[in-house]
Amino acid sequence: MAATPRRRKRAEPIASNAVDIAFEAVANDATLDSPARGLLIDQRRLINAQLLGERLSNGLKIATGAAGLAVAVAAGVMVWQASRADGLVIKAFATPPSLVARGVTGEAVAAQLLDRLNAMVTTANSAEPQRRVAGDPSRTISIQIPQTGLSISQVDQWLREVLGQERQVSGELMIGDGGAWVLSARNGATPLPSLTGAPAELPVLLQQTAETILAREQPDTYASFLINVRRLDDAITYLQTRIASDSVDEQARAHDMIGTALAQKGEQTGAFDAFRRSVDLNARPSWRAMGSIAPREADRGHPEAAARYLERYLEEIRKNDPRDRLTAQARRLRVLRRGSMLATLRGDHGFALDAAAELNRLGSDGAGAMGVLGQRADQEALAYAALHDVERAAALIAKNGPPTVRQVSGSAYQVAAAAGDWPRALAAIEEHITGYGPAESSLENNPVAYAMKARALRFLGRLEDAAAALEATPLDCQDCVMERGLIAAARGDKGLADHWLGQAVRMAPTIPFANYEWGQVLLARGDLEGAALRFEAASQQGPRFADPLSAAGEVLLLKGDPKAAAAKFSEANKLAPRWGRNHLLWGEALAKLGKTGEAKAQWKIAAALDLSGADRARLAANLGKKL
């Protein structure tokens, strides 16, 4: 029987590479300095180095990509900025060597021209968007772009010229015949007039060239510069050339600025006409134009138009357009100034008084900001007089003295009228008219003053003279038409009185004074129902006007309704707390209600306030009654 072969043990796997062999050797030889262990350590170091190299390579690729992206973004920004470039670059002028030797280099000429342009822009302080004006960038330190021979500033300038709207100003300063200097300049491709002068006149030549450039590039700014340096005739001449423009907006701006120049010259009539043309041409006229027109409309007896312009003025100036370049205080002063005028037109004399007081608190700038409304104290006096606080109004006038004949004579008239001192009122208004001067006191430009004169004459009983004062006044003057009606009423001509007063009401549907005066005529006539309707209409037009409230209370008192009358007198007192007649009538209503103590308290207040002679006699009679 053959022997069965012996089955051999399965052999261990043979190592396939040096690392495997090293691992097997280390397993059999654990000494630290064995060759196998050294091989494994070297292999680990090689792997770590490879991994580090891969990381560095990846990081370098990322950094290179980020740098490329940054360059692309920077280039994009440069292109975008270049496409929006819009301004002037003043390049160095060409100058002969003989001038360079004297220090008159092309760079110096360009720098002086640039300085003058920037100084004019600063002086103008114009709301016109300003274009960039800069020196020649090729003369500045620049960073070179490798392997191109170009600098970044050169590339930027090239992009601005190709993509943007920048224009270059260049030129020459030469020596002409007889040693005179000749300055020639070009604005882009347009040659400017060459100027000749003595060497000492170079600053004048540069100024004239700068003005020519500014007039071409920034017309509104140039006009503002001329106005602000008081070259008013030059400004008007320049602006008149712009009126011929095909652009309606440019025509409107030119008329607006002509109005400003004429106003500064004291030619108010021409200024008004210019502002009016500006507003008529412009869908959104400047608040300056509307603020200037409003007082002129009021002087002409157009209170409704004046109120509309004031409302638009306040709406525009409160928008706080940064182009206006007004400080918060300057804006507040203007709001108070014109807001006070609007409030006065609506009978809100309390607001007018508060506005004048705030202008006082805001400091000395407030005096200038009052403009046509007069000095702050004068405006306060007018408000106190309208609120029937004659004592305080008179004290203000006496304390502050006349800044101008026109201003104080105007407020003196109102104070005298409130006190019933019509001889003094007549003298004041005649002085007021004279203070305006021949042109400004004309019937066309200031007919309201003649209506005020007629009123004083009417109260003095001089009805023929009053009518004569109004004879030539225009029929679109609401104050004049209203006074015609009041003169007719004083003559007993009811039909003519109602005709003229009805006309006055229709001419100013948001102004309360015509309805109030018509109500007083009807009250004197004994038409209590008609008077009540007119006083109610006046209160609707002027909800903060105290006079129609008190008059309505008087009607209710006559109709036998003392409770409702007392309520009206109380409302009026909230608006005019120092009105003596209102306290007198309020006391009478309370007495009829059996409130003896309250009635006497009201009469005590009335006794300490201003009252007409008739009202003071009425008060004495009331106090003498056995209640």
Image (spheres, helix red, strand yellow):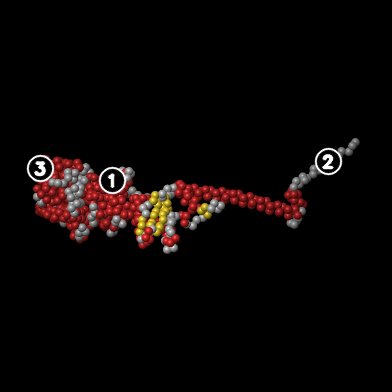
Q: Quadrant of the N terminus?
A: top right
Q: Nearer the viewer, mark 3 or mark 2?
A: 3
Residue 124 image-quadrant placement: bottom left
**Secondary structure category for the residue under label 3:** loop
Circle 2 sits on which residue? 7
**Taking the image as drawn, is residue 155 in sight?**
yes
Circle 3 sits on which residue? 493
**Taking the image as drawn, is residue 332 in sight?**
no
Residue farthest to the top, as pictured: 1
Residue shown at the point (17%, 41%) measured from the top left: 503
Compare residues 266 and 57 and report the one nearer the observer: 266
Amino acid type indicated by mark 1: Val
Residue farthest to the bottom, as pictured: 102
Which badge, 3 or 2, is on the more N-terminal residue? 2
Report how far apart the C-alphas of labels 2 and 1 lie in the structure: 121 Å
Which badge, 2 or 1, is on the more N-terminal residue? 2
Residue shown at the point (45%, 46%) measured from the top left: 163
